[in-house]
Image (spheres, rainbow, N blue to C red):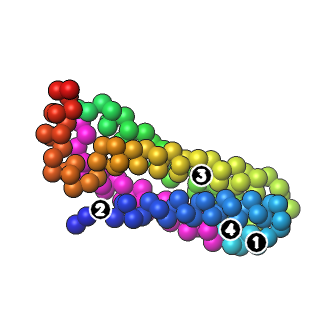
Amino acid sequence: MDSIHPALVHFPIAFLLLLGSMELARVLFGVPKIESVRILAWCALIGIIAAYWSGHEEFESVNVVGNEELERLVGSHENSAKALLWVFPVGLILLELSLRAPRLRWPIWGFRMIAAGAIALVAITGLRGGELVYSHGVGTKLFKNEAKPQLEIEKSR
């Protein structure tokens, strides 16, 4: 069975970018309602969890040991994904707090800062993932079938 990770990673990217755009529009123009942002935030969290889980499962089937560049890229990709997985729920808690205590201003601003950070983290994670796939073939059938000879050829150059 092929990995579902490539399909799932696009959901948190789309939800976080849309969430950021909607929250910016809410700050500047007063629309849309915060409930729309809340729905997108929960969808983003579900997407983040699914993308992280599928990426972790994919990583189990990939062997990059011995190739320092790939080990560094995989580590960077995984670390930024873990940071996103741990940071964004804090932002969601702040968003929920702002809905329950609308007179408090700090929770919504905390959420906005974390959402901006989450967008940056998803961009970093995506760049590293794209580099793994498009520059090195990690996660593709070519990499899985021909990783050993390909790495040996690269080392001999």
Instruction: Specify which label sits upstream in the sequence, 3 or 2.
Output: 2
Q: Which residue is mark 2?
A: 3
Tell me residue 50's x, y (percent).
43, 63
Tell me residue 15's x, y (percent).
57, 64
Q: Which residue is mark 4?
A: 37
Q: Residues within 10 Å of mark 2 (few under 14, many from 20)?
A: some
Q: Which residue is mark 1?
A: 32
**In front: mark 1 or mark 4?**
1
Q: Residues within 10 Å of mark 3 (few under 14, many from 20)?
A: many
- What type is the residue that disc 1 sits on? Pro
Q: Which residues are magenta?
A: 39-65
CA gap, disc 1 and disc 4: 8 Å
Instruction: Specify which label sits upstream in the sequence, 1 or 4.
Output: 1
Q: Which mark is residue 119?
A: 3
Instruction: Specify which label sits upstream in the sequence, 1 or 2.
Output: 2
Residue at 55 percent across and 63 percent down: it is 14
- What type is the residue that disc 3 sits on? Ile
Closer to the camera in the image, 142 or 100: 142
Closer to the camera in the image, 55 or 146: 146
Instruction: Specify which label sits upstream in the sequence, 1 or 3.
Output: 1
Residue at 62 percent across and 47 percent down: it is 117
- What type is the residue that disc 4 sits on? Val
Q: Answer yes or no: is residue 100 visible.
A: no
